Each structure stands twice: as structure tokens, then as C-alpha cells.
Image (cartoon, grey):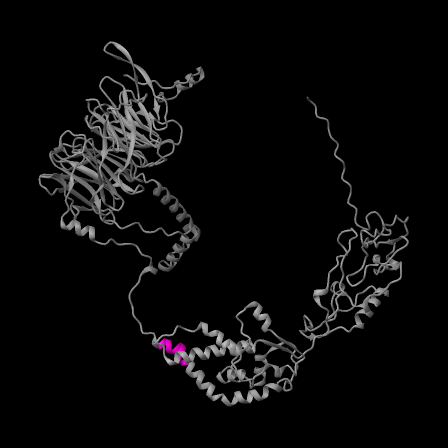
Amino acid sequence: MDSWPAAERARTTESLKRRKRQKPAVGPYPEVDVGAGGPNVVTLLERDGRFEWTFLVQENNQATPLRPSKHTTIFPATRPPPDPSIKSTILQKAERGANFLRTYLPDVDIPAELIRDELSQDAKITESLEKFDPYTRNILQPVVAHESAYLAFPMGELNCDLNISPFVNSRDGIVFKPSAHPLRTFKTPIQQITTTVPGIQAPYIAVRTFGHVNFLQVDASSATPCLSEVAALLPSETGGRAVVDVVLSATPFSSLVVNDLGSVYQCNIIDGDKTLDLIHPGPTEGRRTPFWRLARGTADTNYLLASEHSLSQIDIRADESIDLFSLTAGTSVVTSIEDQGDDNILKLCTTNELVWIDARFTRKPLLAYKHGRQYDRSLEARTSPLSSGTSTSTHHVLYIPSHKSVGAVTLLTSSSNSLVTLYDVSRAKGQPIHINAPSYCFFSDNDAFASYTGSALFSHPLRGETDAFSLVRLTKRGSLHKVDVGASEGEGEGFGVSWDDEVKDLEAMPLRVFEPPYADQAFVELDLSSVYNHILCLPELEREKREEENADAVYNLLEVIPTVWQGLDAPIEHVLTTRDAVLRAGDEPTQTYRADFLTDCVINSTRGYRALTQGRLDPNDLVKGSSWHKNLTATLQRLDPTFPDDARSGAEAFKKYDLAKSPERSAESFRYEKAAREELALDLALSADVFSLQAFSRASDEGPALEDLTQTLSLASEPPEVHFGYLRPKAKEHYSREETDESEASMGVRSLLKDWQVGADPGNYVFVDHYGGSTCTSRKTRRTSPAQVMQLPFGTQSQRPPTILAASTVPRRLPEPTRRTVAQSQPDPAEGPSRAFGFGSQMPLSSQPQTQSSQEYMMSTQVLPGAYGGRPVLPKKKATTKKRVGGF
């Protein structure tokens, strides 16, 4: 056998001994990557008694190109678009499942944890099957009899209906006439359709569903085919496992099936009797995977079985298998295996490359061609035999062999996209395998990311030898599309399409589209005039009626408002608005609320707004009897520039919010709009003024100066009590629940507030931090009046009094340690006054002129004298002695 050289590494004696104990592995073989610009392989070949160099990749410019035609829809879609996925977590699904069980099966007690575990496992399995389903095979298959041909494919919403449509020979050539009605309906969706080899007068097909495998005979004697069931294979007959692949032999009475454990069974049908024999048990060691694929060999007794990483041959006569090929360690797995042809070449497709293997020398493959696709387990290679052509067109160039012998073109397809790659790889008689031209690709559909469930290469037997064929693909929605590939313009059209009225009606029929419950809509017309009158008109009529009844109450209230402060029984300790004062001037309301501004008042009426605009309801009348008054109009205008100055201007400003004028609007609508505008202006005007019957406390001019002088010259250790300006806290006893006006502040609060004067302007106070930093810098203090500035004598000690301890707490006198002192020298005039110890209200002592230096003792915060100040002394840890470590 002529072969191409491959890179082999030198093997050591130890590796050779280890290989003798193991199974013989696959030898090195040539791997090419034409698209990546890899090196070409060359070898010497004997021809006519002389040796000449030949290359693996032959760049022949005289090669005949193939051109794909436009894609055509030959059967309409029968399935609706996929339902939108509902995104929810495992916990949410478990909660819905638990609610369902509690509702419909209240007697069954299933823990929520068990439901969550089952749903988690189901979500993992569903996710893995969405990426790749090993149980799904090709469901589009041409059925070729002696001189007739059909297309077998599923249709319907669930893919349970089997449709077999014929090809008809007419004046215009071969025409495909699809049928709108299925020939047979199964209970579960179809997962695989396979048929016998072409050329048999009465072909058989095998249809595998979720439930079982059906063997059917096709009667092709008439234009409309008929189906008759021959036998059925149940899962219980294959070890209780699901079947993953079926292949029919050349004779119509034998078939092979493999389940998801790798066990192969032979099914023979003789005179209607079915016999099933186990000819190859599945592997017992290693990881079990459900991926298994079957293919025909050269004879009816030899079959090929492919797993994820290996390829073996099964001989049904000897009930044994022979290992042919295995992948090396890596992430690459087998995706498809093609039937063995007359040239004894096996074509294996993996996720990384296409491999051509000679069935007689399987330990050394002929060629490996890297396809450069992403990791895709749905890749499948199909080979179509072609003869030579003479066209030289270069549009959409797809090359075929230029030699006169029969060549082969291999097409690589995927169910996840419409990209089709063509490989022109063939082997002539007496020569090694050659790559006649680099690979090329095209799209079989306008949508590059269309998903497919079946593909087939078809050429009608009545066309004879030709360089044209058709690629037919079945989409997930059930529509059939075809692309004709040929070497010339005349041969490009593989077959025509003719639809009858029923198929056209099937195309026009709307498909059911899933809509969530909230998307269900229906046209319903309701008269909501009664609701409108009840919500808007009726309250307005009742309001107008109440205003007429309370007319005298409004006039009486206007007379009482100026003297409202004199009529109060108890003093009010909080601030009030004008509306609060008006509410207290009238009678008790019939309905009370938690807030006064929500309580209805007779002044909120048209007469109240008229009295406000005429000056009879004037907030200035309430200023005379109050201790404090503040108008908030300027503040509210800073927050909202559109806030009105008075009620009249507010009613005019609010006209911009009126409804659009229309002749359909009634007079009541304009009247309601005006009343609402006036009521809003009245509410804003009654809330613009704030009153208080309790005056704010203010400190006298002499009080702060005398208090500062007293604090300066006093040696008292406690700060004065806290004084309040307006709000006065009340002390509440926790057990007796009694409130008292006297509330004694803590020492910390009094120390912090000792410098603050009631009634002072907060903007003029500057806080001085006496505990941060030691740098003598100039600091601003609170501005004080001239009466508060006191000239203290030079050398006055700090305000902080010395600490006084009880005699019983003082221990025996120890040698006096060195006191910590701070030397205070005369500051540099350029640096400014040095920092003095004091509080914010005290002028810094260093600002006075000093002529001599002094020392100031700092207080010690240590409770007891000594090194540790009475704190417990922890025992000293023993020092760990280092041991000498021997050695270097």
C-alpha cells in the first residue's frame, strides 16, 4: 500500500517494552491543515519504471469547479416556533413543584429537599441534551426503489407523523410533489429514519421513536406509496435500554440495533417471525456513554461500531469484534462514521478532523484533514461520488477531481448551522490518496445559524451519470430546503418542485404560537360612565351641598379667628400654621384624623377662598397675639420658584395645569377644575405662616460675661446646667411612666454645651479642638461682645482644676517620678500666638504679652502611681532557647 510519510519520534527501549504489554496503538499518520498554511507532504512514487516526486495536496488549476444554486423551499414548515424559555432558578421550580403536589396530592408528603434534588438532576440532564442529544439521529432519508424515489421525513407539531412524498418524472424533468397528509402517525416523536441500500424493488425503512422501533415495507408500485408494518422492536427486548442507532442490511430481512450501553442485537425477520440475538455485549469497564453509531461494512456479515473514542468491526458470524482505530488522549471525540464503500476506505469524522482509513490497514490511517470547526458533536460527513467535468467557471468555486476516474466529494455538515464544507479527497487506482484542491465552503440557507434535524445527498436514478446532486435539509420547524450543486449551468438544477392546493393551504395555515397567560387579550367594551360619576361627579355634588349648609359656619369662623389665642384653654407648646389656628377656632370636626392637615374644615370652600382674597381671612390678625411668627414664603420659593406669593396669584399660576379646551367638555368640568384650583391656592396660603405661643429664650448681655468670668475664676469641678431655648425635654420614669419637666443632663453633655449660649447665632461660633495636634497655631474662637472680653492677669493658671483624691485611696508615698512638664517660652511674633489650654469661649492666654517663661503641670490620668498604675501584671513568658541543628 502506498502511503504518505508521517512524523515519528524515536522510541526508547522502555517505551517499546511497555507497548508490547499493551494493545497495539494506532501508528503515526499524516495530518494536514491546508487552511492554516501547513506544510505539504511529499514522497517518491514509481511510474513507468521511474520514480518521481508527488505531493499530497495537488494544486491543479485545471480542476473543474462546482457551484451551489440558490436555496429553495420544497416543503413548508409544520411546527410552530420554539416556546420562549422561562428563566427561573432551581429553588423556584422546586417551590412550584411542591405547591402542585400540595394542591393536587394533599395526602402525599414529599420533602422539599427531595423535590429540589430531583429538579436539579433534571436540569443538568436537560442542559446536556440541549447541547447534544445522542439519541437523536438523522430523520430525513431518501427511499430509492428500482426507478422511483421518495423522501421520508416527519411532519406535524410533535414530529409524530411520517410523510413519504414521491419524485415524479415529467416533461420538465424530475419534479418533487410533496403530500400534505402523512402516511402513518406514531404515538411518540420520531428520532431516526433509515432505509435499505438503493436499488431494491421493495425497499424497507426503519422508524425509531421514543417508544419502539418499527420496520415498514414500502410498496412503490404506484405513484402514492403504501406502508405495511413488518415487525416492531420494544425496549424490553434490548435489555430494557433505549435504542440509539439502527442500520438495515442489504437484504431486507436483517437489521442491527445498538442500545445506549453499547450492546448490539441482530434482528432477523423470516416469514413474519422476528428473532433477536445479542451478538456484541456492551463494555463492562470504563465510563459508560450513550453515544454509539453503526455503519455497514463491505458484506452483509461485517458492520462497524463507533463509540466516542474508538472504532471496531463486528462479524456476525463469529460473534466477535476487532478494534480498528482509537483516538489518542485528548478532548476530541467521534461524531459520525460512514458506510464502507467499494474502495475499502472508512471515513471517520471527529470534533477535530476528518480521517480516511483503509479497512485493510486500519493501524495506520491514510490521511487526517483538520476541518477547523469549533467543538461540535453534531458534525457529520457524507460522500457523494462524482465523475469528471469540463467547466472552468470560478464563481463560488467548489472543486471536483480533474482526472478521468470516478472521484468522491465529501461534505461536512452540522445540525447547529447551515455551513457546508466540501473536501475533494480521493484515491485513484494504484496511487496514494490525494487532496485534489483545498477545501471550500458555502451556506445552504440564508440564515447562517439555522438549526437542522436531518440532511441528505440525493441524485435521482433516472438522471444517470452526472456531476450534479442536491443537498436537502430538514429544519427544526419541519420545512425542507434544497441546494443543487453541479459542475455546469445545465446540470445545476437537480429537480423541480410542484405544490398542489393542499400544500399551499398548509403553508398559509397559521401555526400555534405559545403565549403566556398575561398575553391573552379579548375585545370587551364597557360603559364606565357610572364609575366616572361615582368617583368624580357625585363627590363634587356632595361638596357643593355641604358648602351651602355650612355657609353660616364660615362667616362665624371669620369673626372668631382674630381672637383665637384668647380662647385656648391650655397653652400650646408647638408651632402652628394658619390652618391649624383656623381649625382650633371652629367647632370640633365630625371626623378626626391622625394629622390636622388631613382633617376637613369648613374654611376649605369657595367662601373661604373668597374671604382670603378679600382680606377678611388675613394671617396678620394672628400675629398680634402670638409670641413668635415666621412667614415661609421666601423659603418655599427658594425650594420651588413656582410657589405663589398669595392665593390670588396662585390660582392664576395653576391655570397652566388645566385640561385642554375642547367643545366636548361640559360646564361642570370647567366648574370642577376652577374649584380644585382655588382649593389648592387656599391650602398653600394657609400653610405659609407659622406661629408660636411660646417665646424663644434669649440670654442677656451681661449674663454670658458674668458666667465666663465665674467659670474662669472658679475652681468648681462640674460644668453648669444645660439651658434650653424653645424645646424642653421631659424626663420619663421607666417604671411609673410619669413625666417631669426637670431633666438633668449627664456630665459629658454639660461639658460639651458649657460654652454654648442660648440665643446666640450659630453662624458666629467656631469650634476649637483642644485635643488635636501639638502645633501652636492661630485659631479663631467664637465672636464675643466687648463686655465679654476680660483681661486676665499675667501668669494665670489653666482653668482645669487639679484632681483631688480621697486620703484612703492614696497608697504609701513612693519616690516621686519626674513630672511631665511643658516648657512655654515666649513665642515668636512671626509665628503668631501660641496655643493655650481652654475652651472655645475663652480667649487664648498666649495672646497676652509675656516677658518670662513659665512651666505648667499636666494632669496625670493614671489612677495609682507606679510602673503599671495598679493594673494586673501578666507573668512573663519563658524565652525559648534555640537548639542547635546538626548537619550542614
Task: Please state if 877 lies on the left or on the right of 295 as rendered.
Answer: right
Task: Give the quadrant of the C terminus.
Answer: top right
Q: Is residue 325 magenta?
A: no
Depth check: 118 or 830 in front? 830
Task: Please state if 48 lies on the left or on the right of 619 as rendered.
Answer: left
Q: Is residue 127 visible?
A: yes
Considering every residue shown, the one lying at the far top of the view is 49
Depth check: 627 or 228 in front? 627
Depth check: 585 or 657 in front? 657
Quarter where residue 716 is shown: bottom right
Percent coordinates x, y for residue 335 in the rendering? 32, 33
| 517 relative to 280, above or below | below
Depth check: 578 or 426 in front? 578
Percent coordinates x, y for residue 799 in the rendering? 84, 61
x 42%, y 50%: residue:
90
Q: Which residues are magenta?
A: 530-538
| 682 relative to 407, above or below | below
Quarter where residue 545 is shown: bottom left
Q: Is residue 302 visible?
A: no
Task: Please state if 134 lies on the left or on the right of 169 as rendered.
Answer: right
| 157 relative to 46, above or below | below
Percent coordinates x, y for residue 571 in the rendering? 66, 81
Task: Give the quadrant of the N terminus.
Answer: top left
x 83%, y 70%: residue:
706
Task: Please state if 72 lies on the left or on the right of 170 as rendered.
Answer: right
